[in-house]
Every structure is written in C-alpha cells, then in structure tokens.
C-alpha cells in the first residue's frame, strides 16, 4: 500500500498560514502541522509542501486595506500621498520584498 502526502486544505491550511506568520522555523511548523493532521485523522503533509507554503506566506507583500491605510493617514503614521498608489492599484513593492524576515529562534 502506497500512502501519498495529504493535500493541505481547510483548517489545516489556515493553521499552517497562521504559524507561518510567527517566527518559527519551518521544521517546527512542519512538526506542529503533522501532529495536527494526525489528530484530524489525515495523512501528514510532506515537509517540501509545508516549506513551499510557509515561504510563500512569508514572501507575500502585505498591502494594507483601505481601513488600515485611512487610519494610518488619520493618525499621521503615513503620508496622505500613500493613498494615491492604493487608488491607482499600483502599490509599490520593495526591491527586497520577502528577504527581510525576523530572526528565528535558534534550534
């Protein structure tokens, strides 16, 4: 009998994305997601797929919502000029987007 790695969907995917935003190593996230999958009666996802998803979440550029942007302008955390890229749907991406990450805990 051959068992393939599980698809990461639903609650498991949501949990994986939540953990990816924390300063944990991919190995720690993989262990946590594997344990969670087993409690749900599912097959453990592969390390490679967990790594792909974690890196994708961590590399994504976070574009603020209109509410966040207007609040930041109101509290003078951003310039009113920051509304123009949002209005034109041309939000700038830093050249090194995704490369700056918080330092993770040493194993």
Image: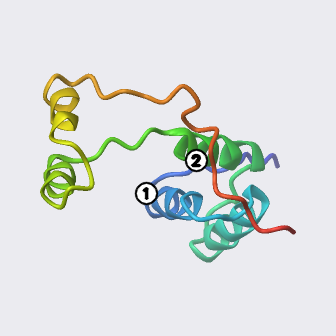
Label disc, if present, on residue 50 of the rendered structure? none
Q: Residue furthest bottom?
A: 39
- x and y percent of residue 77 in the render? 27, 55
- Closer to us: 32 or 57: 57
Residue beneath the point at 15% across and 41% down = 80
Disc 2: CA contacts within 10 A as few (<14), some (14-19) or many (>=20): some
**Quarter of the image where one finds residue 102:** bottom right
**49 on left or right of 21:** right
| Image: 16 above or below 47 | below
The local secondary structure at tag 2 comes to loop
Residue beneath the point at 62% across and 77% down = 39
> In what quadrant of the picture does the C terminus appear?
bottom right
- Closer to us: 42 or 52: 52
- x and y percent of residue 97 in the render? 54, 34
- Closer to us: 44 or 65: 65
**31 on left or right of 85:** right
**35 on left or right of 8:** right
Residue beneath the point at 13% across and 51% down = 70
Residue under pointer 2: 7
| Image: 68 above or below 64 | below
CA–CA distance in space, label 2 to label 1: 10 Å
- Closer to us: 105 or 85: 85
Residue under pointer 1: 10
**Quarter of the image where one finds residue 14:** bottom left
**20 on left or right of 70:** right
- x and y percent of residue 101 in the render? 63, 50
Residue beneath the point at 56% across and 51% down = 8
């Amino acid at each position: 009998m051959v068992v393939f790695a599980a698809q990461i969907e639903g609650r498991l995917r949501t949990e994986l994305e939540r953990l990816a935003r924390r300063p944990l190593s991919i190995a720690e996230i993989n262990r946590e997601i594997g344990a969670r999958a087993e409690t749900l009666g599912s097959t453990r996802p592969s390390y490679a797929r967990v790594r792909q998803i974690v890196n994708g979440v961590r590399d994504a550029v976070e574009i603020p919502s209109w509410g966040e942007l207007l609040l930041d302008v109101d509290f003078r955390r951003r310039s009113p000029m920051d509304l123009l890229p949002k209005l034109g749907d041309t939000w700038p991406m830093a050249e090194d987007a995704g490369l700056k990450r918080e330092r993770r805990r040493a194993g």
